[in-house]
Amino acid sequence: MAIDKSLALRKDIEDVNEIPGIHKLLNVISCSSNMRFVAIARVTEERWITAVSKDDIEFGLRPGDELAVESTICNEIRQHHIPVVIEDVDHNTIFCNHHTPKQYGFKSYISYPIFLKDGSFFGTLCAIDPKPAKINNDGVRDMFKLYTDLISYHLESIHKLRQANRKIKKQDEIAELRETFVAILGHDLRNPVGTTRICADMLLSSKIPEAAKKQAEIIKSTSYRMQSLIDNLLDFAKGNIGEGISLNLSEDNNKLEKELGEVITECKIINEDRLIESEISLHQKVDCDTTRMAQLLSNLLNNAIKHSISKKPVLVKISSSSSQFSLSVINHGETIPKKNQRELFKPYFKSKAKNNENGLGLGLYIASEIAKAHHGNLGVTSEDGVTSFNFSMPVESSLESTGTLLG
């Protein structure tokens, strides 16, 4: 069966645009290198296609737009696989008479090849500017190399996720493939998440414009959100093979309040257009795993934001008394039917809401298992458009720092 090359290339363009934070990444590259046009191009022997771009010079290329491949330096990179860096075309002995800068009117240029995990050439991460730029240095070169590796990691993860999704739709294989699906995600997402955080930390510790630092902070925050997803997946996988959720208990309210506050702050940064209010009042010491409690709150809060009305606030209420520790997340949205409320905490349960189409259906399940591990209870009430997820646990408990099986 012949493969439709145009369809495959269109899917490649879509994959690039599905990479989390890809536009923020291009913004950071532009600010850090002073190159005002930055793009990822899908390059083959016959075609040069814009996958995604940041264009501050009105070069005019948007996703799907093409250049004649023979007119580009990227085509030469496709053949020799060597990065090209030009600070000033007029003073570059190799490219001063080259047809590409003459045709497209740029003075500075940098392009690094992107290779997939199997070694095949995908395209380039490239940038141009009509003015000369100081880009032939270790800092810029290392940044481009790091980002091309990051893009490659993400594309590989997207490809594997798609393959896993195709398989998991077959009901007769779902029991076996569920483990494979989770294992693929949990393993292959760790590298790009770690690389994302390294990139953000490098930028935040370097001398770059404030605008670039803000973008780097958002990228770093997004990496923590991805880590939360991985944690949910791995917890589910471990539960299925009998390892369960382990607890590291402590009575440290300062640490507990700090970690819960960080979750709320992170959600505010990622969802800057949403109003998130919080009330935290810890009067009694709480014996719990603070990291797991932060994971529980993160799952509940992300769920509330996803299903709430954008103009209404999401409220987080956390308190401890002499008898119990309570945590509630309240949002305004569609009332959850009673029959669905019983199913919410089961793995892979997803509502039919449009904003939940890309969810994995594990967040509430993992939250409920964290609650059980603490000998607590997680429930939900939903009436008249107000939904509240409520967790409570005894303050004085006989918990032990051991694994608690999922399920």
Image: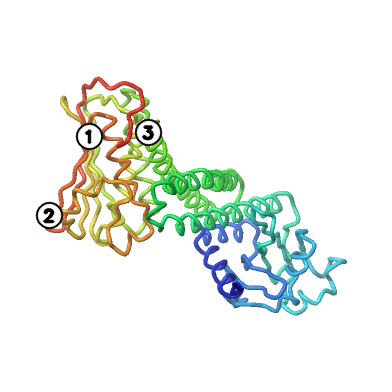
- Secondary element at image label 2: strand
> Residue at coordinates 23% horizontally, 41% vertically from top-left?
279
Position in image of residue 89 (x %, y %): 80, 69
Q: Give the residue pinned by disc 1.
A: 281
Among the 4 quarters of the image, the one containing residue 71: bottom right
In this view, the residue in front, 318 or 160, is 160
Is 70 placed above or below 122 here? below
Question: Dot 3 corresponds to which residue?
Answer: 291
Q: In this view, does 161 lie above or below 188?
A: below
Q: Real-space Cα distance between discs 1 and 2?
A: 26 Å
| Left or right: residue 368 compared with residue 240 | left
Of residues 302 and 8, the one nearer the viewer is: 8
Determine which of the numbered discs, if any, sits on residue 383 in the image. 2
Image quarter where the C terminus lies is top left
Q: Which of 254 and 132 is in front in this view?
A: 254
From this view, report whether residue 227 is shown above or below residue 157: above
x and y, in percent, of residue 38 in the image: 62, 65
Upstream in the sequence, badge 1 or badge 2? 1
Q: Which of marks 1 and 3 is in front?
A: 3
Image spot of residue 98 (x, y percent): 82, 74
Q: Which residue is drawn at 37% across and 25% down?
A: 248
- How crowded pointer 2 is (Cα within 10 Å; few <14, some 14-19, many 20+) is rated as some
Q: Is residue 137 left or right of residue 309?
A: right
Mark 2: amino acid: Glu
